[in-house]
Amino acid sequence: MSTTTISRERSKNSAGAIWITQAISGLLLIVILATHMIAHHFVVEEGLRDFEQVLDYISNPFIFALEVVFLVVATTHALLGVRAVILDIGLSDGAKRTLNWILAIIGGITLIYGFWLAISLQQLA
Amino acid sequence: MAEQVTSPKNETTSRPIPAWFDVRKRRVGSWAFALNRLTGLGLVLYLFLHLIVLSTLLRGPEAWDQFLAIARSPLYLLLDVVLIFGLLFHALNGIRVALVGMGIGANNQKTLFWVLAALAAILLVVSAYLVFTK
């Protein structure tokens, strides 16, 4: 098998794995988002929790875990989606690698910020 | 791959992203593809804005109350409905793309699209009612 064929096979496998990740994270998001919208908005008087209610909400360990999972899944799905849109432009292999790194860094910063925010709020509660 | 099922790439190959906005001679699948991408980009922007807004909580109850006053204004509630439209369209069209990508309902994807669009419309009306009455 030539280097080009191996490279094409890897690229094909990687695209398949990304597509499956996108589909699974999308499905998970629908479930988590529906729970989030109902628990956080639709059952609350006037649709938004006041300061004390938010702290009560986030101090529940189950809710905290749910929101953290929500953050991870939403960030993954969002950045894979942005990647797909940018790849539509038609990038070289080098540019694709750079894009992957940039998105990984943005994802890392988003997750660190989100975890910090969730933990800070829980400590306030 | 589902992207190949719905992508307008086959219709215009030279300028893929501007091609989303080219509305001439488009089928439902191409419209769904373009709208799926546009709602997706809007939701990414919203995700980051939402995370930034939530940091207001760290500035205490007064700062959060000020945000709540803005968030309960009619214009903001209208934007909430636009957001819910984006969420519903992206989620339900995403289900269609995933199903078709797995080979489920590939021959009936137009019907699947309209059934899910009807479901999205019903859920949007219910959600808009809740947004403006809760």
Image (tube, rainbow, N blue to C red):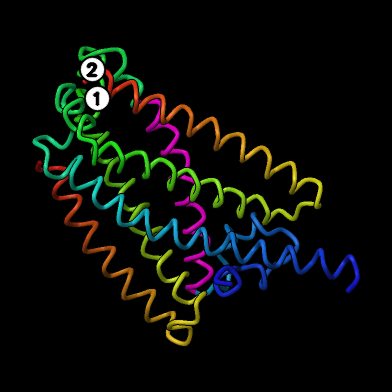
- Quadrant of the rendered image containing residue A103: top right
Q: Nearer the viewer, residue B53 or A8?
A: A8
Looking at the picture, which amino acid does disc 1 mark? Ile
Looking at the picture, which amino acid does disc 2 mark? Gln
Helix, strand or loop at disc 1?
Answer: helix
Magenta-colored segment: predominant secondary structure: helix
Residue under pointer 1: B70
Q: Is residue A39 magenta?
A: no
Cα separation between marks 2 and 1: 7 Å
Residue B132 against residue A32 in the figure, above or below = above
Q: Which mark identifies residue B66?
A: 2
The residue lying at 68 percent from left, 40 percent from top is A101
> The numbered mark 1 sits on a residue in which chain?
B
The reply to whether callout 2 and callout 1 are in contact (CB within 8 Å) is yes
Task: Please report the bounds of the magenta region as a residue range.
Answer: B28-53
- Residue neighbourhood size for the residue with mark 2, other residues' Cα within 10 Å, grouped as few (<14), some (14–19), many (≥20): few
